[in-house]
Amino acid sequence: DGGEADYKVLALSVSDPLADRINDLESLEEYRPNTVSLMREWFRNYKVCTGAEPNEFALEERCMDANYARQVIDLTHNQWQALVADGTTTA
């Protein structure tokens, strides 16, 4: 959004019937083929109907693994905590 990074995290409910089998991107593709591709295309185009241009993706359009997602979550959470501590935003 606005040319800034806008991370998306894929998650699976523990109550999903395949939760015990889907543990990473490879098993997601095995049990739900094309899910990542379909989601990518949805995120690319979901604002087009409002007159916006299609979204672009960083990282060569790759979907990153859980370790990468955890690092992004930690980083952005720490940034949020710093903003709250400065009093420049509220929780």
Image: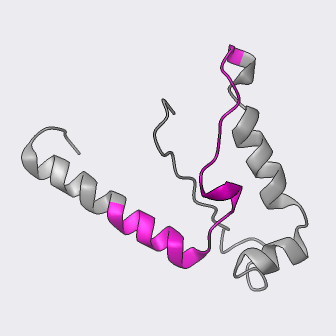
Q: Residue furthest left?
A: 86
Q: Residue furthest top?
A: 51
Stretch of the chain drawn in magenta: 50-75
Which scheme is used to colour this image of the protein? Answer: one colour
- The one nearer the camera, 59 or 46, is 59
- Quadrant position of the C terminus in the picture: top left
Q: Position of residue 2 (x, y in %)?
A: 48, 29
Q: Position of residue 9 (x, y in %)?
A: 58, 59
Position above or below: 79 against 48 = below
Horizontal side of 4 relative to 21 (left or right) equals: left
Within the magenta stretch, is there residue 63? yes
Q: Which residue is at a point 13% across and 38% down the rendered structure image? A: 88
The quarter of the displayed image where residue 62 is located: bottom right
Q: Position of residue 45 (x, y in %)?
A: 75, 32
Horizontal side of 78 relative to 59 (left or right) equals: left
- The one nearer the camera, 58 or 36, is 58
Q: Which residue is at a point 65% across and 19% down the rendered structure image? A: 52
Horizontal side of 90 relative to 7 (left or right) equals: left
Position above or below: 44 against 19 = above
Q: Which residue is at a point 46% across and 72% down the rendered structure image? A: 70
Position above or below: 31 against 87 = below
The quarter of the displayed image where residue 61 is located: bottom right
In the rendered picture of this protein, how many numbered marks are placed on residues? Answer: 0
Q: Residue furthest front?
A: 60
Q: Position of residue 23 (x, y in %)?
A: 70, 82
